[in-house]
Image: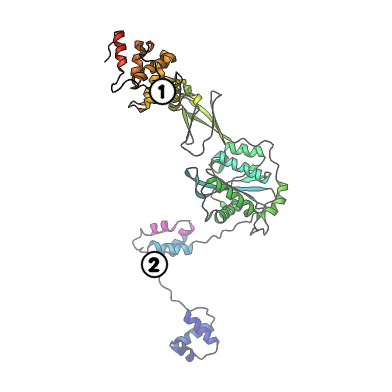
Amino acid sequence: MSTFLSVRALHEEGLPKKTIARRLGIDVRTIRKYIRRIELGAREPRRARVPCKLDSHRERIGDMVQEGLSAVQIWQDLRREPSFTASYETVKRLVRQLRPVEVKVYSRLTFRPGEEAQIDFGDVGRLPLGNRMRRGHLFVMTLCYSRYAYYDLVTDQRVPTFLGAIRRGFEFFGGVPERIKPDNLRSAVLLNQLGERYYQEDFFRFCRHYGTVPDAARPATPTDKGRVERDIGYAKGNWRRGRDFDDFELARTDLACWRDEIANVRLHGTTRRRPADLFQTERQHLRPLAEDAFEISTWGRYKVRKDMHMHVEGNYYSVPFRLAGAWVTVRMREHELTAFADGELVARHERAEGKGHTITDPAHLPPQKRLATQEIHRRRVMTVRQAGPHCAEFLGRLRDTRWVQGDQVARLAGLVTSYGEDAMDRACRRALYYGAIDGATRLERILERGLHDRPLPVDSASNVTDGRGDFGRSLVEYGALLALGEVRA
């Protein structure tokens, strides 16, 4: 081709054929041949046609293409013939030439002010929420006339989250469009069967409450909601790209600032107007908000486990212990969860964020299990301390022994309940005097034998080691014991 074009250019300049041949290094006879074709109107050199293995099958392949068969099917059918030796790639190239190319064209959509708002979600990656990483979903609702948009960041696309985001969008616009066009997510379209789609019940009641008409986009047809699709791409590129956040709520706050300071006040590439300016016109055509906000909630039935908790969306919530093993009806609102049994309200909890949490109401537990282990231990300690000063001193010195303190405290509290505070305090006084700080067993023996009622040889609350010298007991004590006729080792 380059040689042909060079010959034509030099010939048009009026150079002789031999001069062109010398300059291009080509035989003059070739130059004469090219010039004859150029003078006859040729625009390119003549190419020799290379024989193709499919020449004898070309007409048949064309008929099969018209029938709608794929290149693989055509190749599989032809290779059954012994004389057919072409490869699949050769068949595919010919099929590509024979198949007519359908040019896709789209109608440009126009909207009246307040006529439609388009809704969609976009994935913005994982963001930190508490001590866990959660996938963030960008919610966008765009008014089709003004391109004024509401942006929000959520952690899921469930019905309460979906409806809550739409409601906040209506409140942000200060009105409701005539029609809203969501995607075919399950929170909006519950069933798509035989060409008919059925809306999710809560979503349909939500639209009826606000006086707007739901009109979901066709499946796999993003051009039905091109305005919101473009806004999602714009937000991902202009807001999310290159930004890292340490907290989910911080990301939401940053998105709201970007929405108000950049997205809605930029010069739009199509309208050549700012969305905020066009929205002033569209605002007047929006329908007024309902007097009462739609109460967002979902219902479900759950079985109560043996531990008196029900497993709802990854978290555990308690119900009264008498319902263990029974089925209850649960109503889930945005921030609250309530459970009903036989039409009666039996539990009310604040909804947990994330998953893996356990929410327990102590009133739901049996009376014997309503106190935590720490609380039971604390109450036992208070019972022993309040029995008297000697009990408190005995309990304090018990910490230095080898006994398990929790077990000893439980036994001491039991002795206070069985024998009374006064008897327990005198028994502790006697044990402290003799240095018998070896657990509740010695106190129990003193109380059982009535030794707490006997006077001490030396009535002193001072240092218990006074008068003992190097002996384990005071010598005066042995004399007192002999006088009473009691011999103790």
Disc sitting over residue 393 in the figure: 1
Q: Where is 151 relative to 470, above or below?
A: below
Spot occupied by residue 423 in the image (x, y as percentages of width and height):
41, 13
The range drawn in magenta is 64-83
Asked if disc 2 and disc 1 are in contact, CB closer than 8 Å, the reply is no
Among numbered discs 2 and 1, the one appearing first in the sequence: 2
Spot occupied by residue 66 in the image (x, y as percentages of width and height):
49, 58
Q: Is residue 470 magenta?
A: no
Residue lying at the far left of the rendered structure:
489
Kindly report the distance in space between the C-alpha atoms of the residues bearing marks 2 and 1.
108 Å
Quarter-of-image position of residue 180: top right
Disc sitting over residue 44 in the figure: none
Looking at the image, residue 136 sits to the left or right of residue 109; the answer is: left
Quadrant position of the C terminus in the picture: top left
Residue at 68 percent of width and 38 percent of height: 290
Counting the numbered discs, the total is 2
Disc sitting over residue 53 in the figure: 2
Q: Nearer the viewer, mark 2 or mark 1?
A: 1
Identity, as a three-letter code, of the amino acid under mark 2: Lys
Question: Can you see residue 138?
Answer: no
Q: Nearer the viewer, residue 441 or 436?
A: 436
Looking at the image, residue 255 sits to the left or right of residue 25; the answer is: right
